[in-house]
Each structure stands twice: as C-alpha cells, then as structure tokens.
Image (tube, helix red, strand yellow):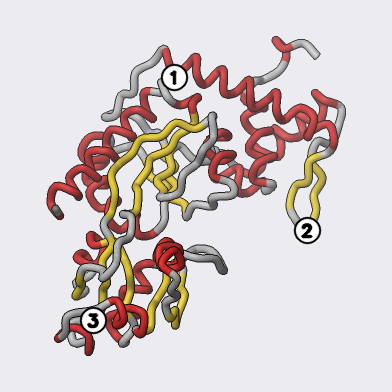
C-alpha cells in the first residue's frame, strides 16, 4: 500500500464505523450521506483486501484485521489533529464546528441555557450536542473524539485525561412547600425516618449520602430511585418524599429546602478533556465558556 494513493479521509470514516458500528449513525455524525459512507467502506476494503466490518444484528462487527489496525489509525488521527489544532486559530464567529459535550441532566439544566446564549452571540454557526455520560466509556469517548468535553462529579484518575475543577455544590434537604417537616426544626432522626428519593443513573449502589451515613453507622429509607433530576423535582413537588440535592438545583426548581442535619462533602464539578485536545483552539474556547457560565452560577447563588 502506497500512502500517496490512499485518501486519508477514509481513515476518519473507518474509525467512526469501528466506534459506532452503524453506517447510518456514522453518516449523521460526519454530515455525509449513507451511500457516501458505504462507498468509503468499499474503497477501504479494496485498500486492505479485507471486509473490515461484517453486518450482524449487533451492527458492523470488525474483522481481526480491523481490530489490528484500529489503534494505529486512532493514534495517527490524534497526531494529525494535534498538528492542525496547534497551527490554527478558532474563529468562533465563522466556525460551523459541532461541540460534543457529556453531562447529566442536572448539569444540562443549569448550564445550557446560558451557554447557548453565548454560542448564539459569539459562534452562531456552531452546533452543540449533549450526551448523557456513560462513565464506563467516558475515557474512550474523549480519546476517540466522540466527546470533546465531559462535566462530571466523578474522579477519573486516568493519565490521558486533563481536568479543571469548576467548583463544588452544597447539598440541602429539599421537599414540597407544604411538607409536614417544613414547620419544624429538622433533626437527624427526622432525616432517617423520612422517605427519600434518590437520583442515580446506575441500577444500584450507594450514593454519596448513603456512604456518609454508613460511616456514621446509619441507613436512610430510600422509597424511590430515578435517573433524572428533572423528573425527581416533579415527584418532590407532588409527594411527601424528601430529596438530598445540590442547593442550586433546589432553588432553580422552586423547592423548599433546609440544611442537612449532618455533614456531607459537597459535590465536585469537574471538567475533563483528552490530553490531545489540550492545545486545540476550539476546545480551549469552549472550556473557557463553560468555566465562565459556571462561575456566574456560583456568583448568583452564593
């Protein structure tokens, strides 16, 4: 194979097919038609004299040859991206870049309205796409470019990722305005006796409150577990459940709230990106905008 006879754009499509396992999804992500992606795959197959991907009920399954070359392809694309990114400036006003952000719905509701106003003003032709983060895939998604930036409370001790602390969110005990507990001084015993709502994207496992209580030798009574903060707020407004949630969100949703009757560490807000994007002008620009939006949130709420 002679490199000067190979269209390097084919390797971008190859990596996307390997990652997404779906021709239609790759076409949408790369702003191509499905026939164009299929044609690119056909050319790749001729180049490598191998099928590379086989259709199956689970999507496009890579062949052993595809598995063998994916690491080198990704490394080469990263190096090329670094070279391009380090030698150009991000022209926000004329850019049509799509920014891909990973965050949960709590972060979306608090940050996206203000962030979108900035984008419409400073970078009107860019696009913003948000994904509900999958922590098992987070590092790989940042590495592959499926995500540009990730906002999460979790700590990723991975050498490939760089991070910026955006601040910490204080927890409060939230409830509806006419909840029976509103009229009294809430004690630790009241907290333990109350029926709690817990928000988590996981099917099981302990939350930060449960870990703090367990250290004290106690358990709380979790009556309901959901994965969405917006839905949780609606449930709290209409039931006698209580919810331990960041103060900023409780205020935003008009919930009545009180200080917790025990000590809990605030929830960290961290911004992550892959080290290959550290000097990328577009990534730098978006990091700065997110940092400013979250700084404004803290200033207006504390």
- Residue located beneath label 3 in the image: 176
State whether residue 286 is above or below residue 198: above
Q: Where is residue 95 drawn, in percent x and y? A: 34, 30
| Disc 3/disc 2 C-alpha distance (Å) | 47 Å
Q: Label 1 crowding class (10 Å Cα cut-off): few <14, some 14-19, many 20+? A: some
**Residue at position x 54%, y 44% in the image:** 138
Q: Is residue 153 left or right of residue 250?
A: right
Earlier-in-chain disc, 2 versus 1: 2
* 52 sits left or right of 186 in the view: right
37 or 154, nearer to the observer: 154
Q: State the quadrant of the N terminus.
A: top right
Q: Tell me: 60 left or right of 130.
A: right
Mark 3 touches mark 2? (CB < 8 Å): no
Q: What residue is pinned by disc 2?
A: 57
Q: Could you tell whether 31 is left or right of 21 in the image?
A: left
Circle 2 residues within 10 Å: few <14, some 14–19, many ≥20: few
The image quarter containing residue 183 is bottom left
Q: Earlier in the sequence, mark 3 or mark 2?
A: 2
Picture coordinates of residue 296 (x, y %)?
A: 17, 45
Q: Is residue 70 above or below residue 174?
A: above
> Mark 1 or 3 closer to N-term?
1
In 3D space, how far apart are the residues under numbered discs 1 and 3 (Cα atoms)? Answer: 50 Å
Q: Does residue 265 appear in the picture of this structure?
A: yes
Label 3 crowd bin: few (<14), some (14–19), many (20+), radius 10 Å: many
Under tag 2, what secondary structure?
loop
Q: Which mark is residue 85?
A: 1
Q: Give the residue drawn at x 24%, y 42%.
A: 120
Residue 227, image x, y percentages: 46, 68
Does residue 129 sit above or below 246 in this rendering?
above
Q: CA distance from mark 2 to mark 1?
A: 38 Å
1 or 3: mark nearer the eye: 3
Toward which corner of the image does residue 186 lie, by quadrant?
bottom left
């Amino acid at each position: 194979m002679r490199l000067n006879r190979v269209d390097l754009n084919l390797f971008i499509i190859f990596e996307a097919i390997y990652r997404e396992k779906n021709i239609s999804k790759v076409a949408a992500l790369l702003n191509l038609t499905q026939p164009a992606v299929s044609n690119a795959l056909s050319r790749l197959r001729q180049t490598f004299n191998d099928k590379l991907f086989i259709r199956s009920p689970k999507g496009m399954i890579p062949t052993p040859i595809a598995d063998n070359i994916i690491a080198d392809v990704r490394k080469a694309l990263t190096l090329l991206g670094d070279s391009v990114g380090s030698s150009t400036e991000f022209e926000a006003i004329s850019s049509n870049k799509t920014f891909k952000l990973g965050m949960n719905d709590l972060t979306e509701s608090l940050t996206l309205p203000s962030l979108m106003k900035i984008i419409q003003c400073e970078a009107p032709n860019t696009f913003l796409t948000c994904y509900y983060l999958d922590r098992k895939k987070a590092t790989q998604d940042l590495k592959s470019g499926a995500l540009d930036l990730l906002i999460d409370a979790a700590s990723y001790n991975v050498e490939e990722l760089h991070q910026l602390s955006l601040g910490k969110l204080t927890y409060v005990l939230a409830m509806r305005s006419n909840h029976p507990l509103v009229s009294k001084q809430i004690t630790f015993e009241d907290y333990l006796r109350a029926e709690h709502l817990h928000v988590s994207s996981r099917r099981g496992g302990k939350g930060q409150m449960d870990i703090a209580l367990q250290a004290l030798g106690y358990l709380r009574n979790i009556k309901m577990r959901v994965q969405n903060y917006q839905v949780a707020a609606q449930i709290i407004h209409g039931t006698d459940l209580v919810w331990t949630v960041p103060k900023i969100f409780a205020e935003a949703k008009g919930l009545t709230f009180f200080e917790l009757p025990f000590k809990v560490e605030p929830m960290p807000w961290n911004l992550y990106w892959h080290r290959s994007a550290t000097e990328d002008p577009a990534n730098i620009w978006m990091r700065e905008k997110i940092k400013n939006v979250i700084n404004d949130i803290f200033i207006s709420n504390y």
